[in-house]
Amino acid sequence: MPKFYVTTPIFYLNAKPHIGHAYSVTIADVLARWHRLKGDDTFFLTGTDEHGEKVEKKAAELGISPQEHVDRLSAEWKEAWKKLNISNDDFIRTTELRHEKAVKHFVKLMHDNGDIYEGVYEGWYCTSDETFIPESQLADGKCPECGKEVRKLKEETYYFRLSRYQEHLLEYYKQNPNFILPKKRAAEIINRVNDGLKDLSMTRPSVRWGIPFQFNDKHTIYVWVDALVNYLSAQGWPDKEPKYWPADVQIVGKDIVWFHTVIWPAMLISAGFKPPKSVLVTGHFISEGKKMSKSIGNVADPTELVNKYSADSLRYFLMRELPLGDDGDFSEKLLAERNNNELAADLGNLVFRVLTLSSKFEGKLEGKPALESSMDLKAFQEAMDRYDTYKALEIIWRFIKAANKYINDTKPWELQGSELANALYNSIEAIRVIAILISPFMPAAADSINKQLGIPSGRFEDCKFSRIDYIPKKGAPLFKKIE
């Protein structure tokens, strides 16, 4: 059985999740559900990043311990993904003992390979992003990602010999052209690596909320070195070999590409592991003309949106609005338009019309599969296998529109006998197949269709018209229009 391993970034616990986080985790969920639909042995990981200076400071402001602070927030993130119908197989927290054990062993492997040495770091640091920033990358003296003030640091540290892996990385990029997806994101990384790599400060003597550095207990391990190991620690490593490594695809926002396509693969090579097969870089949702940010205050809360609309409506919008790797706008008005014009009018109306007509038919539903040729299953599978969920939804919607056109053209309400049976057969089989295809994107809607058809959930191999041996029964509309 083929294996498939997909991860999200583990999200930093400085606030509740926003729509950008929901976007990343929904893409991962769609891909995981797709591979399960194909019958693959699938593992889907998400979680929370809970160490670092920012967490330490926030807990102090609140007058509670850092552990109490992250316990509260992590529970909120778990609940948010539950409401969004996320089907992760594990949820890793970097404060778990299994993770600390893995990080220390990973660091030991790097140390034993001669890649860790003592020194002094002097330079700029962004506490908001927990990131060391070369002076040449500052934007008007501020962090280029979050726009916040940075501060000058001079402290003892232990370095990771990142510079040693420049040629290793460039060769890996060359031999694996799908490592950074979409490919338009690769050029910037390759150019930066070509310009040379500087060794990475990987411990902090000034931060106590972190995993102790075993070679000097006055230091803790830099939060980013700590966090990246989660993709192995969640699989029980080092107590057992990681069943699903290397990861097939690791989904990240474009603001953390450097960590996942340069620092992480270099660490892996140092410790004796293969890098992941692909890193899928998502775009950002824009609100009020700016990237969504907690500091700006223009974020949207996915839990509130699910409570107000539905998980499927939000999931569909997230997957339908942004082409792979692009930025795009978010507003509740756009969400409502997608819901009303596509979910309610196209899909919901199709299912409701077909099942209303079939519930009045008393004969045997059979015929020739006239609508089957409108399904482009090959193109759909190719899009999903290259992680292009946006394109895959376009292909599904072409089939939904073809099914609606078929009903409008055949006018089954005017037919009788075998002609009516044939029209209903094609229409019902179409919505059965549609339920299979949309199930990774909108699992609740797919379940509702299957329930009305009186059948269990199908597999991708069932996406072909066959004899109807089930009794459809009309239920409630799939989607309500949003005023």
Image: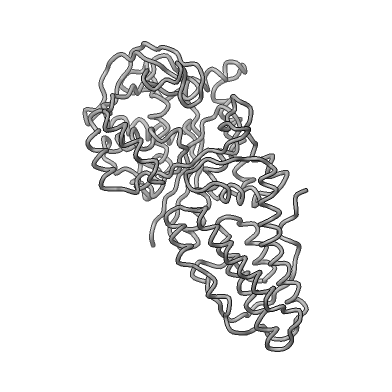
Q: List x then y, in percent, for residue 449.
A: 66, 65
Residue 288, by quadrant, is: top right
Q: List x then y, in percent, for residue 48.
A: 51, 35
Q: Residue at x 45, y 16 (%)?
A: 141
- Is residue 204 something one can see in this rendering? yes
- Is residue 209 something one can see in this rendering? no
Q: Is residue 139 left or right of residue 72?
A: left
Which one is in front, 301 or 209? Answer: 301
Quadrant of the snapshot with the N terminus:
bottom left
Q: List x then y, in percent, for residue 4.
A: 41, 54
Q: Is residue 147 left or right of residue 175?
A: right
Q: Residue at x 61, y 72 (%)?
A: 430
> Looking at this rendering, what residue extends furthest in the bottom direction?
417
Q: List x then y, in percent, for residue 203.
A: 36, 21
Q: By what rule are the colours in the image chosen?
A: one colour
Q: Residue at x 68, y 88 (%)?
A: 418
Image height check: is 180 above or below 290? below
Which one is in front, 82 or 134? Answer: 134
Image height check: is 475 above or below 74? below
Tally of numbered tags: 0
Image height check: is 445 above or below 263? below
Q: Is residue 148 left or right of residue 182?
A: right
